[in-house]
Amino acid sequence: MEFQELLPRRRMVRHYASEPVSRQALERIVATVRRAPSAGYSQGQRLLVVTDPEKRTELAKIMSASGWTTVDDREPWLESAAALVLVCTREDDYHERYQQEDKLAATGGEEVDWPVPFWFVDAGAALMMLLLAAIDEGLAAGLTGVEGAAAVQIRERFGVPADVAIVALVTIGVPAPDPGWSAITSRRTKPRRAPAESVRWESW
Ligand SMILES: Cc1cc2nc3c(=O)[nH]c(=O)nc-3n(C[C@H](O)[C@H](O)[C@H](O)COP(=O)(O)O)c2cc1C
């Protein structure tokens, strides 16, 4: 699909049909993480893909208990997705990478004074790849943050190592109507900012 065709289709979908999604399609979607940019080519992004129905249910329950994703009388969201992808980042990859030989001229062997946490920036770039790749496969995707207590439980249950931070959860599946959620959080309730509001040229 051409980028100009794909981009207008990009929106968070929070309800999916029960149709299965092929393993091959999911593999292509998650493989896009290797094409995402990363600071210093640190490649700190990590994904945990959950497709097993029992595990998905368990993960959805942990998330729902946090209250972030479930409100009565709306479409089931996490529960209906064919795949739940935890987008994670390993900060130490960045600290380690910037102490490597080819970075020493820039860092002098000192810890970098990070202008912003690049590991979270890169996780954002990675999740955008997933959101777009899902559409390219004829599927849909959504995104939710992961509340702190839920992250602790997920870490424990799914074995996420201590040096890997959970950044967000991406849902992937065959799209189904989602009027309830979309009415609340999507662009249907307010217009996207005009480029002139978000973008300055030449000086602020
Ligand atoms: C970091 C991040 C966290 C988000 N967390 C949630 C969330 O917890 N629940 C939710 O329904 N949507 C969440 N969203 C989706 C946004 O609400 C959505 O992107 C925004 O409303 C714009 O709608 P659109 O993506 O459909 O264009 C999140 C998006 C981002 C980037």
Image (cartoon, helix red, strand yellow):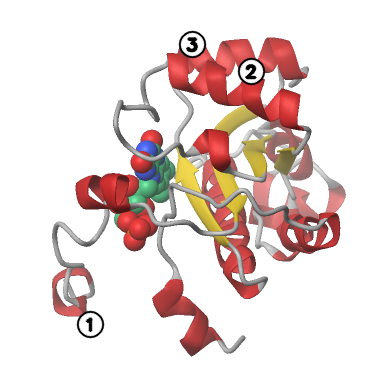
Q: Residues within 10 Å of mark 3 (few under 14, many from 20)?
A: few
Residue under pointer 3: 149
Q: In the image, 177: left or right of 112?
A: left
**Nearest to the observer: residue 124 or residue 204:** 124
Residue 141 against residue 118 in the figure, above or below:
below
Q: Nearer the viewer, mark 1 or mark 3?
A: 3
For badge 3, the amino acid type reads Ala
Looking at the rendered structure, the secondary structure element under dot 3 is helix
Looking at the rendered structure, the secondary structure element under dot 2 is helix
Asked whether the residues under the numbered discs 2 and 3 touch, taking CB atoms below 8 Å apart as contact, a structural biologist would say: no
Label 2, label 3: how far apart the Cα atoms are:
9 Å
Checking the image for residue 201, the label placed there is 1
For badge 2, the amino acid type reads Ile
- At which x and y percent is residue 46? 73, 41
Q: Residue at x 60, y 11 (%)?
A: 153
Q: Residues within 10 Å of mark 1 (few under 14, many from 20)?
A: few
Lower sequence index among marks 2 and 3: 3
Label 1, label 2: how far apart the Cα atoms are:
43 Å
Looking at the rendered structure, the secondary structure element under dot 1 is loop
Does the residue tagged 2 have its C-beta within 8 Å of any atom of ligand 1?
no
**Nearest to the observer: residue 117 or residue 189:** 189
**Does the image show residue 168?**
no
Q: Residues within 10 Å of mark 2 (few under 14, many from 20)?
A: some
Q: Residue at x 80, y 58 (%)?
A: 22
Label 1, label 3: how far apart the Cα atoms are:
42 Å
Residue under pointer 2: 154
Image quarter of residue 89: top right
For badge 1, the amino acid type reads Trp
